[in-house]
Image (cartoon, helix red, strand yellow):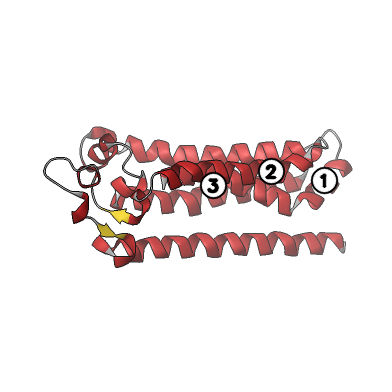
Amino acid sequence: MVQLDIPAAFAVSMLFIDVGRNVLKREAEETPGETPRAYYQFLFRSIFFAGFVISPAGLYLLAGWPGWEQLYWGKRVEELILQGWFNALLPTFFIMSIVLAGYLGHILGYRLITTGKEKFLRPIYIGVLVLSSIPVLLSYPAFLLVGTYDQYHNLSGQTREAMVYAWKNPYSFGVGWLGVMIYFAATLIYSILKIRKENKARDMD
């Protein structure tokens, strides 16, 4: 959902930096005054994850179930996605925000580990995830129900009772959401394992 996708891109970038901090610190020390190669490798990894994992997952849910994706916070989102010229700009800005968050997470994470402030790295990205989860949890039961803004807010003769729980797969939502989460989790785990493998290989050089 929108409330988590953008913070997640920021947090994942910092997580990658955290996992590979030893390599990044060592290369930064070996190339004073220059930007080490590892910096760009991790930047690519962060931008790739934001652009090819989080963005398509978020856009898929936003296009298919715009009400659920933004927790029924506003009817205008549904209207813009489903009709009007602005419908193309909204998902565009959404993707740009995700990629920008990934970039900023990388920049901040790298700066922290190269300026002796790495102790703040983990608390920051964990804190971002916790804080971004609070409004989602406070929106209960929005994230459990699939339908329209009108249904959730009992408008235009539609009622919340007409909505269906997410796990009952209304409008093929359950299958789509599960596929998105498997894709996200598998790619994240693969990325972390790959970084750790690269760390070990570099330590042996």
Q: Mark 1 sits on what residue?
A: 25
Query: Which callout, 1 or 2, points to the residue nearer the camera?
Result: 2
> Given the image, on which type of amino acid does mark 1 rest?
Lys
> Which of the image's four quarters has the C terminus?
bottom right
Where residue 37 appears, x then y in whole percent?
75, 46
Q: Amino acid at mark 2?
A: Pro
Q: Secondary structure at mark 3?
A: helix
Mark-to-mark CA distance, 1 and 2: 19 Å
Kindly state the secondary structure of the residue where label 1 is placed.
helix
Residue on which disc 2 sits: 123
Q: Position of residue 167 (x, y in %)?
A: 34, 65
Percent coordinates x, y for residue 141 in the rendering = 35, 51
Q: Secondary structure at mark 2?
A: helix
Residue 8: image tag = 3
Q: Residue at x 79, y 37 (%)?
A: 117
Residue 54 x %, y %? 48, 51
**Closer-to-camera residue (88/183):** 183
Q: Which mark is residue 35?
A: none
Seen at 63% across and 60% down, the residue is 191
Q: Earlier in the sequence, mark 1 or mark 2?
A: 1
Going by the numbered disc 3, the residue's amino acid type is Ala
| Residue 100 seen in render | yes
The first of marks 2 and 3 along the sequence is 3
Q: Residue at x 62, y 40 (%)?
A: 105
Q: Is residue 42 left or right of residue 9?
A: right
